[in-house]
């Protein structure tokens, strides 16, 4: 499946779960905690898949490298808040305030991905590339959910730090022409 379809589906599910956590704020803390744990796991697996497959690929292109790094940095902020929320007391005002900040960062991040990042890489890849990335994304998420780590275990869960070096960045030799869309990469 095209990776954009998979990412958008996840985004929709994440937003719905974040809303459920917010709605659960007046209910029993066990329900709130359970709902939060579900969204936390989904977000972590989604980020791992994006970093290992989607952003790893985008970092190799001059046109999308900065946006990919920006997105990974936003992931780091989200993951830090997520760790704090996991161990915090869901009944506290501190937790509720932190959750609101977390939700707003994640929703902003999703908007950026769908409204800017997807557009930026549209012309860099062809349909078979997007399908291939979709398959790898699904596989990476599955691996993460099964093992709690991404395919490069031991190097941490994120693609950050393993980013391509500047040497590896593909700068356009000429201005990007329409045929660039058909160019096979990597
Ligand atoms: Fe993301
Ligand atoms: Fe995403």
Image (spheres, grey):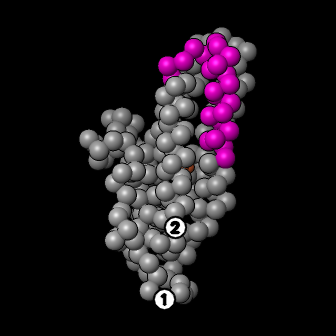
Rendered image quadrant of residue 20: top right
Q: Which residue is mark 2?
A: 64
**Residue at x 29% of width, y 44% of height:** 155
* Residue at the image point whose x is 54% and y is 53% from the top: 71
Label 1 near ligand 1 (CB < 8 Å): no
Q: Which residue is mark 1?
A: 174
Q: Is residue 56 left or right of residue 124?
A: left
Residue found at the very far left of the displayed protein: 154
Q: Main secondary structure of the magenta part?
A: helix
Nearer to me, 64 or 28: 64
Q: Secondary structure at mark 2?
A: loop
The crowd level at tag 2 (other Cα within 10 Å; few <14, some 14-19, many 20+) is many
Region in magenta: 86-108
What is the quadrant of residue 28 in the picture? top right
Where is residue 129, by image quadrant? bottom left
Q: Is residue 105 magenta?
A: yes
Q: Is residue 94 left or right of residue 37?
A: right
- Tell me the quadrant of the picture where the C terminus can be found: bottom left
Using the image, tell me which numbered label, if any, was put on residue 95: none
Q: CA distance from mark 2 to mark 1?
A: 16 Å
- x then y, percent, for residue 158: 39, 46
**Closer to the N terminus: mark 2 or mark 1?**
2
Indicate whether 139 appears above or below 119: above
């Amino acid at each position: 499946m095209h990776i954009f379809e998979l990412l958008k589906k996840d985004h929709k599910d994440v937003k719905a779960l974040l809303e459920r956590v917010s709605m659960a704020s007046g209910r029993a803390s066990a329900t709130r905690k359970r709902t939060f744990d579900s969204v936390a796991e989904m977000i972590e697996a989604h980020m791992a898949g994006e970093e290992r497959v989607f952003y790893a690929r985008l970092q190799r292109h001059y046109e999308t490298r900065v946006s990919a790094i920006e997105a990974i940095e936003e992931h780091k902020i989200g993951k830090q808040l997520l760790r704090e929320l996991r161990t915090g007391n869901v009944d506290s005002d501190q937790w509720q305030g932190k959750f609101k900040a977390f939700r707003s960062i994640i929703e902003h991040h999703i908007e950026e991905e769908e409204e800017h990042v997807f557009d930026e890489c549209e012309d860099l890849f062809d349909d078979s590339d997007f399908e291939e990335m979709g398959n790898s994304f699904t596989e990476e998420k599955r691996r993460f959910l099964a093992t709690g780590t991404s395919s490069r275990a031991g190097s941490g869960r994120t693609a950050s730090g393993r980013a391509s070096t500047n040497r590896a960045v593909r700068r356009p030799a000429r201005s990007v022409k329409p045929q660039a869309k058909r160019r096979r990469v990597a």
